[in-house]
Image: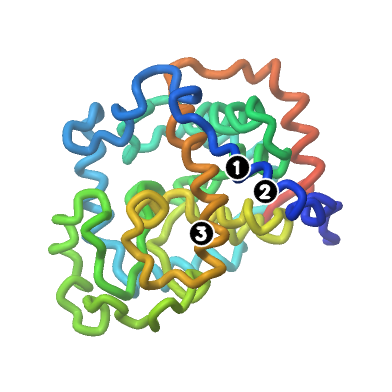
Amino acid sequence: MPRPNQNPLHNLDEWEEDLLSRYPDPESIAQSKPTEAYRNYEEPSRDTVKEFYRLNHTYQTYDFVQKKREEFLKFNKKEMPVWAAFDFLNQLVDDSDPDTDLDQFQHLLQTSEAIRRDGHPDWMVLAGLLHDMGKVLCLFGEPQWAVVGDTFPVGCAYSDKIVYPEFFQHNPDFTNQSYNTKYGVYAPNCGLRNVTMSWGHDEYVYQMTKDYLPEPAQYMLRYHSFYAQHRENGYDHLMDDHDREMFKWVKLFNPYDLYSKNPNPPDWNELKPYYEGLVAKYLPANLKF
């Protein structure tokens, strides 16, 4: 299938200086609580959070991720419109998220609407709408610990900047000498394109949509859950210069993803015509899952 009109790619240089000079004010996005109350993992408001990360950190091994990439990145499970995936997300509440108990589609709309209100280009609005669509992996029987939550590199030592790092002591890779050194199977500053991340919705949605979106949007999708780097700089030793440049976009995106979460769902009936047009502009009628 031919790629959609990619004119936005040609405008990136014109937009970049302006966009990156006006990072959002987190306080203007957060509507339900102070920004410092988000990502509270010391006393999470939902009982599912800590148990989720115990499972995630125990079972996300290098070999596990390779098997999941082989299984799911063939995209031979199903073919359906984006809207069918969103219908599923209407039923899914993320067990790893301490900040919202709304279904995932409502969160996607809150994110994309916050981006749109600040006047960012429509490909970034679409990234907001799509960024958690990879959670449809749960539709194929995957447990949430293999789909959602913060992501991190596998195949090298786990950073103490990752949420609940103490749970990694139960992971077989923690004591595997091939994987538990600073660089593990990687070379210094090899670039994230050469690094295998923990398996989940970020990589899945990136691989599914990368042919249709400009590179900044690809980075937003692929690394939006990589908090150990884009907020804590825990993996600078694996980043190359291109990653550092592109992570400006990930950091631009992050406040919209995090602080737009609030208990008030958007009015889908009002927003539907705009988003139907946006999806049709960039994506084919059906995507392979």
Q: Quadrant of the C terminus?
A: bottom right
- Residue in the foreground of this view, choosing between 125 and 73: 125
Mark 2 is surrounded, within 10 Å at the Cα level, by few (under 14), some (14 to 19) or many (20 or more) other residues, namely few
- Considering depth in this image, is 245 or 109 the residue closer to the camera? 245
Could one spot residue 143 in this view of the protein? no
Residue annotated with mark 3: 203
Q: Residues within 10 Å of mark 1 (few under 14, many from 20)?
A: few
x and y percent of residue 238 in the render? 40, 72
Contact, CB < 8 Å: mark 3 with mark 1? no
Q: Is residue 145 visible?
A: yes
- Does 254 sit above or below residue 193? above
Amino acid type, label 2? Glu
188 and 3: which is toward the camera: 188
Tell me the amino acid under the disc marked 1: Ser
Disc on res. 186: none
Place of residue 185 in the rendered image (x, y in percent of width and height, measured from the top left): 35, 82
Q: Do the residues bearing badges 1 and 2 touch, measured as CB atoms within 8 Å? A: yes
Q: Residues within 10 Å of mark 3 (few under 14, many from 20)?
A: many
Element type where label 3 sits in the image: helix
Please name the residue shown 53% across and 33% down the image: 24
Residue wearing tag 2 = 17
Above or below, 248 against 32 in this view is below
The residue wearing badge 1 is 21
